[in-house]
Structures are given as C-alpha cells and as structure tokens.
Amino acid sequence: MLFELSEMHREIQTSIHQLAQEKIKPRAIEIDEKGEYPWDIKKLLSEYGYLGVNVPEEYGGSGLDLLSFCIVVEEVARVCASSSQIIAVQELGMLPIMLGASQDLKKRVLPELAAGNKIIAYALTEPNAGSDVQSLKTRAEKDGSTYILNGQKMFISNGGVADYYTVFAKTEKGISAFVVDKDTPGFEVGKLEKKMGIKGSPTAQIYLENCRVSEDNLIGEEGQGWILAMKTFDKSRPTIGAQALGIAQGALDVCQKYVQERQQFGKPISSFQAVQFTLADMATNIEAARGLVYRAAEMSDQVEVNRKNPKLVQAASMAKLFASDVAMKVTTDAVQLLGGYGYIQEYSVERMMRDAKITQIYEGTNQIQRLVIARTMLGGK
C-alpha cells in the first residue's frame, strides 16, 4: 500500500492547496451565508482542469488516478466543503457513464463534463428509497427506440444547476441507468432544500412525468443499474472520505493558529496540557483517516472494473465511515476549543462542524457502511 505520496501526487497537492488557500478560502464564509451555487469557483476549477481529473484523456480529462482526485477534493474541502461538492458531485454523476456507458454516449457527454462546460447530477435517492435502493419507484418503460420515465427523486445534489442527470429507474430487466438532459419535456426540478450545511451546494427534488429519453442514453444495458450504482460507490465513498478528511484538517488548521495566539492566565492556551491533548487526538485521528482514504483510493485503481472485489468494497466503506466520524468529532472539538469564538462565523469552525455532518449521511449512512463492512467479513451474510 502507498503510504508516501509520489512526486506526481505531491505536485498535485501543492498546486491545488495553493489555489484553494488563495482563491477559494476567501469566498467560503460568503458562499455559506448566501447559500448559492458558487459559479465563480466552478469556473475557476474548470479552468485549472479539476473537473476532469480522473476522466480518461480520450474524453477530454486528465486521466489521473482516484488518489489524485481525492487529494484535490481534500484540499478544497479543507477551506470550503461547498466548493468541494462541485468536484465531488461532478465525479459522482460521471462515474456510471465512465464505468458502463457505450463509446457513443461517453463521447457525447464526457468531454463537456470534463471541461466543466456542463454540470451533471446523480439521481438515485427517492422519498421511499434511500439506503434501500431496491425500493425504487421510478419506472422506465420501453416504447420503440425510447424509454418513458415517470417518478420522483429527492436530495439530489446539483439539482437545478445540472445540465445532465444520471437517473436510476426500474425497467423490465431490473434497475437501469439513463442520462437525462435537463431540457427533456416532462423533466422538472422541484423545491430546493434548506440544509444545515454545504449550503453552497444545491439539493433539490426532481420530477419525471412521461419524460421520453432515447435508448441511446441508456447507460450500459437494461438491468445493469444496480451493479453500476454499487461500483460507483466503490470509487465515490473514498471521495467522500477525502472530503471529510479535508474538513477535519481545515478545523485543525484553525485550532493550531488560534491556540498559539489566544492568551489566558498570562500565557498562550497552547501551553495547557488539556489543549495539547485535544490537538494530539485530532491530529492522530486525521492521520489515521488519511491512511484509510488514500489506501482505498489506491486500491480502487488496482482493481479490475468489472470484477467484484470484497476487499475494495470494505476498504471504501471503512474510509468513508472512519473519515466522516473523525470529521464530526474533530470539528465539534474545534468549536469547543475555541469557546465562544468557535460559535461565531468569523472563525469558520462552526461552519465546518455543520458541513461535516452530511459526510456521515450521504453515499450511504455510516450505519450502512458498518453493515457493508460486516458482510464483507462474514462472506456476505
């Protein structure tokens, strides 16, 4: 396993770190306050090629590995979780296409997405189908050379700003996946949700009413949607782990600076053992999470796409589970460590604490991750 980043990975880390600190960090508080999609940050990330990091070069991307992508997400989330969603959700929506779409469909949509000219969303969750994906109610009925989609999706990240939606629906042969253009008649974006955190990342309900989609927009074959969704999670869960890792590291960055400047009883509070112990626990847990995330990302690139690998499934779930729990613990401790200052927006840790919570929920709740891990240990039982 790779525990020391290669020279290439360090160059990527240095580059995105500088961009995030100089260009994205100054916007973070405003993005959270306004609760609006940061189009300027999307444009910035597009210009530097960060929306196509792991898209193959033949489709206009950089063709880099998942570890490179996780490093990018981590560094952006370190200063602004909402901005990291721009990259993470773009990857999430593209993954089923990269994993299973026809060459024609890949060539039609991936170049625009990799360049950041178009935005995509991943539409799986429904009012009665969250962790239980098999309970999908959205249906796609074949009608000649088209499919007619009917149903409702909810909690869809990028809802309302996306140009394309990767939509999962039930067909005669099981769950299938489709690329749906936002301008397709019968496709409608519902209300935007008001959320605790990641406020700069829109989350919306989606309605499909007699939405007619060409069979050419079917991703793979009928009935492959379930497999595509699960294989997507193998790659997207380490990404969420990286996002959580970045949030935690960002909170620690604030704490390290604060405790050396804050004076109480005539000396910096960094001289107090209780503060030192808290910082030590934060740093140790963050480093442990980083090891799990990087390990899962590296493993993902070594495993054949079309082969089920319980070790990869386990590693991806462990990375997401542990890193998100660490993010929640570290950010909560950061607020406590800063006292009254931690509770106000100026010091950012209260925002980081709110942002951290969602990493324990989406891409499969942490309770589901524990089930997945246990089943890989017990042979699927």
Image (cartoon, helix red, strand yellow):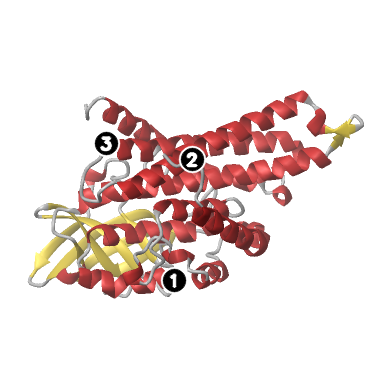
User: Image point 78% across, 38% down: which residue?
Assistant: 259
Instruction: Single out the mark in the foreground, 3 or 1.
Output: 3
Disc 2 + disc 3, Cβ < 8 Å:
no
Within the image, what quadrant is residue 293 found in? top left
SS at circle 3: helix
Residue 310: x, y in percent?
Answer: 27, 36
- According to the picture, the residue beneath numbered tag 3 turns out to be 310
Other-residue count near label 1 (Cα within 10 Å), few / some / many at <14 / 14–19 / ≥20: many
Which residue is under mark 2? Answer: 3
| Mark 3, other Cα within 10 Å: few <14 / some 14–19 / many ≥20 | some
Q: Residue furthest front?
A: 7
Q: Quadrant of residue 212?
A: bottom left
Name the quarter where the N terminus is drawn: top left
Residue at mark 1 to residue at mark 2: CA–CA distance: 31 Å
For the residue pair 298 and 237, the one nearer the viewer reads as: 298
Q: Residue at x 27, y 41 (%)?
A: 132
The numbered mark at residue 199 is none
Q: Give the mark toward the camera: 1 or 2.
A: 2
